[in-house]
Image: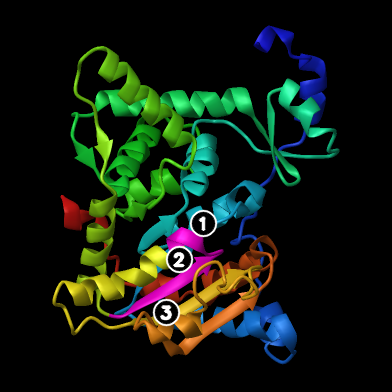
Amino acid sequence: MSEQIDQQRKAELLSKTVEHIDITSFDARPIIDQMANMSFTSRDLARATGIYNQMLADRDCTIFLVIAGSTSAGGCMDLYAELIRSNMVDAVVATGASIVDMDFFEGLGHKHYQALEIPNDNTLRSLYIDRIYDTYIDEEQLQDCDHTIGEIANSLEPKAYSSRAFIREMGKYLAEHGKKDNSLVKLAYEHDVPTFCPAFVDSSAGFGLVKHQVDRMKAGAPYMVLDAIADFRELTDIKIKAGPTGLLMIGGGVPKNFIQDTVVCAEILGHHDVEMHKYAVQITVADTRDGACSSSTLQEAASWGKVQTVHEQMVFAEAGSVMPLLASDAWHRGHWKDRPKRGWAKLFG
């Protein structure tokens, strides 16, 4: 179908790349300090930033970065990478889209593009351009991502893997063949930061992995599989051994519920001394009108024994507009500089 695409029109629409924000290039501390004396979302953000700084200053605290939504495609990709590079988070729980379609995709050398105009979406389809709100992805490049995931699967021993184990192989691939230093997947591999995607196949990985299985089945050969139970078990293992923990959550949904559930799972396994998550920040535009908040509110989670309500803060804002301020403030305050490096990935060999 590619020969039918109007390449000139496609090039016009994919002419301006999304530039990812660099939290080290500006100091947000004066802004956050003044926001603390304001009201509404500004004060909420200042308090959330203070809680994140408390996590970083607490030398016993393991910090989980929890990502849902499209902020990576929208310009926060290097921000998340910097949190790993600077030892500001110790493990990641995310959607497959954040890890594969966005971060791994750019790690292969591809780009996201600003939509300077939004024509009819059927026109975009005819040009093989996928749209995320006001951001574009070249579908042909995304298929390269699918293909690469399939190649990685084909190279592995045909057995069961947790998403963490497979994403580690993705990071190893980028370390050897990648074209971008600021990749969360690559840096997580290099810094032993385990990364979990509890709904991993709900992404470009799904297409590559399905093709891997179908091709192997046709050949009568064994194939690799993803073990979602191992995901939960491994993440719970970290929670059991970590002691005090903090959650920095962007969005909600499956990643948010998954990390909160580790406390309950640990208790089911007989570890009644495992603490609730001590610190929790959630940045979201969801609310409680649907009976939740893209998974339970932090206060509601306390009733399940998942999150303490002493150091928790909801921030109702589009994360791309406030995460740069929170992360820049925390980076410049520098509590990360003498944090112990945990390397939780080493727990799994």
Q: Where is mark 3, residue-wise?
A: 55
Residue 244: image location, x then y, percent: 30, 80
Residue 194 picture location, percent across and down: 31, 54
Q: Residue 80's mark?
A: 1
Residue in the foreground of this view, choosing between 238 and 175: 238
Query: Tag 1, which secondary structure?
Result: helix
Measure the alpha-carbon separation of dots 1 and 3: 16 Å
Q: CA distance from mark 2 to mark 1?
A: 17 Å
Figure check: 119 above or below 33: above
Q: Type of residue at label 1?
A: Tyr
Q: Which residue is mark 2?
A: 256
Give the SS element for disc 2: helix
- 45 or 264: which is nearer to us? 264
Q: Is residue 248 magenta?
A: yes
Mark closest to the chain's N terminus, 2 or 3 = 3
Q: Residue at x 27, y 19 (%)?
A: 216
